[in-house]
Amino acid sequence: MSDLALVSPPLPTSPCLTGEALKLGIMASGSGSNFEAVAAAIAAGQLNAQIQVLIYNNPQAKAAERAQNHGVPAVLLNHRDFDSREALDAQVAETLQAYGVEWVIMAGWMRIVTPTLIDAFPGRMINIHPSLLPSFKGIRAIEQALASQVKLTGCTVHIVTLEMDSGPILMQAAVPILEGDDAERLHQRIQVQEHRILPAAIALAAQRYG
Ligand code: GAR
């Protein structure tokens, strides 16, 4: 059975490619495949945007290497160097502002964000989460879905609000859970859909709220 992608609303067929490029700041903690998907959509002319900066919190994050390959400045803000979540978020906000960022994309940022950051970009932060919200909020969303024995999960792109994984939904894609799936195999299929909907959802957010 192939992946079933149920997307609501439909992916924009003619994304707005005129006007000024959206100035994006991307936050990532790990592999950065979603960073890559956004960069690829920009390079392919499917998203009228520019990635101003990548912020990463984990010195080993492969996302930093990807940023370098795309000529995007990568700034390490290691959470271990900060006394509190708020102190980290203040530095994140300051860095994003220094790079002229208008829209902030949390693409696998595995830290809880605080009002210190959210209030600096009200309504202009976007998060991608590997479940069909409102199901399976928080960490280990894929393991939660497997444990619950649902037959369908997926991914969600939403606007960030103060309550974690709860802001207005921009786009979702569904992925069936197949016989014999483990977290890794299911995550791989979810990521195929993430890479498809994240760039489209950024365009949609800018069009709807920009
Ligand atoms: C993505 O699958 C994203 O949904 C998830 O982290 C992964 C990052 O992958 N985010 C969360 O779990 C946030 N709660 P990537 O580094 O390859 O883009």
Image (cartoon, helix red, strand yellow):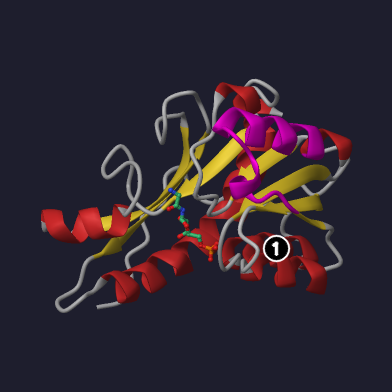
Which is nearer the eye, 29 or 81?
81
Quarter residue 89 falls in: top right
Q: Pinpoint residue 97: horizontal percent, then vertical percent.
A: 82, 33
How crowded is the residue under tag 1: few (<14 C-alpha within 10 Å), some, or many (20+)?
A: some
Q: In the displayed structure, would residue 188 be above or below residue 37?
A: below
Q: Quadrant of residue 134?
A: top left
Q: 195 and 46: which one is in front?
A: 195
- The magenta stretch is 76-95
**Quarter of the rendering occupied by the C terminus:** top right
Please say whether residue 164 is one of the residues in the magenta stretch. no
Residue type at mark 1: give it.
Answer: Ala
Q: Which residue is mark 1?
A: 41
Residue that appears at 13% across and 53% down: 148
Q: Nearer the viewer, residue 38 or 204?
A: 38
Relative vertical location of residue 148 with respect to residue 90 in this rendering, above or below: below
Location of the N terminus by quadrant is bottom left
Is residue 132 among what the camera can see?
yes
The residue drawn where x is 65% and y is 37% is 88
On whether ligand 1 comes within 8 Å of the CB at mark 1, the answer is: no
**Which is the main secondary structure of the residues drawn in magenta?**
helix
Residue 114 lies, with reference to residue 11, above or below; the image says: above
Q: Residue at x 25, y 65 (%)?
A: 176
In the image: residue 66, left or right of residue 30: right
Is residue 150 visible to the viewer in this orientation of the structure? no
Q: Is residue 70 left or right of residue 141?
A: right
Is residue 94 rendered to the left or right of residue 8? right
Q: Secondary structure at mark 1?
A: helix
Near-viewer residue (154 or 207): 154
Indicate the position of residue 142 as horizontal and vertical percent values: 29, 59
On screen, 144 above or below 189? above
